Amino acid sequence: MLAAIAGLTACSGGQKVQGDYGTVPLPNEIKKQNGAPFILKPSTPVLIEEGDADMERIARYLAGYIKDATGKEPQIKSGDSDKGIRLTLDSDIESNEGYRLTVDENGIEISGATPAGVFYGIQTLRKSLPAKAEGRQIELPAVSIDDAPRFAYRGLHFDVSRHFFPIDSVKRFIDMLALHNMNVLHWHLTDDQGWRIEIKKYPELTRTGAWRKETVIGRNSGEYDGKPYGGFYTQDQIREVIAYAADRFVTIIPEIDLPGHQQAALAAYPELGCTGGPYEVWTQWGVSENVICAGNDKAMEFLENVLAEIIELFPSEYIHIGGDECPKIRWEACPKCQARIKEEGIRSDRNHTAEQYLQSYVVARMERFVESKGRHIIGWDEIMEGKLAPNATVMSWRGTAGGIKAAQMRHNVIMTPTSHLYFDYYQSEDREHEPLAFDGYVPIEKVYSFEPTDGIPEEFQKYIIGVQANLWTEYISTFSQVEYMEMPRISALAEIQWRTERKKDYNEFLTRLYRFTELYDRLGYNYAKHIFHTAAQSGQTVTDKDPA
Ligand code: ACM
Ligand code: ZN
């Protein structure tokens, strides 16, 4: 059907190239219209209403995208000019991120209920243009597209603790999100191997906690590289990145992982740990047993003070407080932690140890603090061990069972299972020819097959607010490798997040993806090319791409 709407071939005469609405993610409703196509020429302006700053910014993005494709930047005009690409707001559009894109011979109109909707409309138009149309006119078939996302939360997680990435890389990461209609960057800012965000009240966090003396080679080989490593973001840089993201309708959700994954903080402030240290910023991978002392009020205040600065900086409704992988061995032996257990009347039962309930105590206390500031917490699914904090959103990573259970308890859930959405896992079985990765296997076809509401009774499915893939960076030290691990798997994720009714025809998806990679090429992304190998093996004809 899509082939009938638009083809890839150049039109006769060689001057025009054709657009194709079969992009990624595929718009939810594409209706071919009778009538002549619109011819996008260098003289075609982008039309907006006078004095609308949001729309002007979006128009400038669109002008830039068209220039990237054609070499000519269109003019942005306000008022009632005749033919052009008109961007408008339309309160009749139901979804606040939805848009309508109509094309006929007289022009293109993109309307949304909000500027965000218009932004997703221009993303679709951008992706419908041929990636390379230098000096050409582009023929866009008459069409009416009505589109809106399936999930309100469309996330991608980025660990900048294990390896640090400067703000220009984070901005490029945000551009990659926008290209895939995603709206959340889950920014994992702290962990055992490095604290990456300036906190004014605790300067040692970045003076000491942001630097490790060396890094283990490979998978905890026992050998170290002997090179000091680190970095952090100042609060000014953080504000700059938040603004950059907001301009592109991306919300940044910061994660301060607690009470585990805190060894870098303990290296800076050893008195916050059960043993008092000394501790070092960890130089190897894994889950450190050195966690925040849950019995020490100073340590609880430390966490609250850090969260207070985080909340001050980040405008997001949600603050991620981690909660994963917190070994209890220190708490079991710590007089202060044991005193807290007594004082709070915490008892073990058939399901959980007293120390697991102590973790619930910490998470609930942090939730109360975050809620007192008018925000909500997200935690990894371990926060369900013990007693789930009343308003917490659960991020289900150890499979989907935690998420299914949380949804049935009427808690909001974000699905991000290791089985389908851990992009630090290998994407090919041919490991010899892959960069070192986490010891797991998530090929793009597996990603594409994920269905976030499987196993959830219909009445609870509404609690699944979103889907996310995670990128842990133990084995990823360059941004080029970040791109390689994300792309093109992120395209399959975008389909899950955006499309309401997927037939899950993987081959049909691949056809669109092959074309989409031409845009990856033009944007200079270092994406993985396994899809071309697979196609070659199954005898499909693909593009003339060199399977590098
Ligand atoms: C996690 O992967 N530890 C949430
Ligand atoms: Zn303790």
Image (cartoon, rainbow, N blue to C red):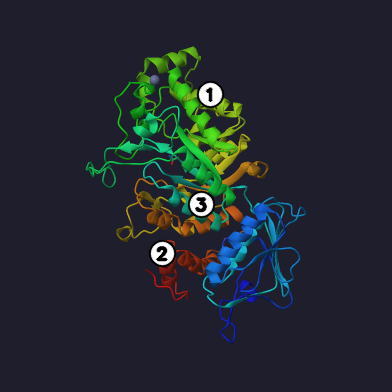
Work out whether mark 1 precedes mark 3 in sequence or the reverse, and give the earlier one: 3
- Calculate the distance from the C-alpha at mark 3 to the C-alpha at mark 2: 24 Å
Q: Earlier in the sequence, mark 1 or mark 2?
A: 1
Q: Tell me if the residue at label 2 has its CB under 8 Å from ligand 1.
A: no
Q: Which mark is residue 167?
A: none
Name the residue carrying label 3: 174
Residue 427 placement (x, y as % from top left): 40, 57
Q: Secondary structure at mark 2?
A: helix
Foreground of the two, 383 or 193: 193
> What kind of residue is marked 2?
His
Instruction: Tell me where residue 266 appears, x and y as whole percent.
Output: 36, 28
Mark 1 neighbour density, 10 Å: few (under 14) some (14–19) many (20 or more): some
Question: Splitting the image into four quadrants, where does ligand 1 fall?
Answer: top left
Rendered-image quadrant of the C terminus? bottom left
Measuring 47% from the left and 22% from the top, which residue is drawn there? 300
Amino acid, disc 1: Arg
Q: CA distance from mark 1 to mark 3?
A: 32 Å
When the figure is inspected, residue 413 is found, relative to residue 136, above or below; the finding is above
The three-letter code of the residue at mark 3 reads: Ile
Tell me whether circle 3 and circle 2 mark residues in contact (CB < 8 Å).
Answer: no
Residue 59 drawn above or below residue 267: below
> Which structural element holds mark 3?
helix
The residue that disc 1 covers is 365
Q: Which residue is mark 2?
A: 530
Residue 318 located left or right of residue 223? right
Residue at the location (38% across, 28% down)?
A: 291
Q: Residue at x 38, y 50 (%)?
A: 440
Give whichever of discs 3 and 2 has the lower sequence position.
3
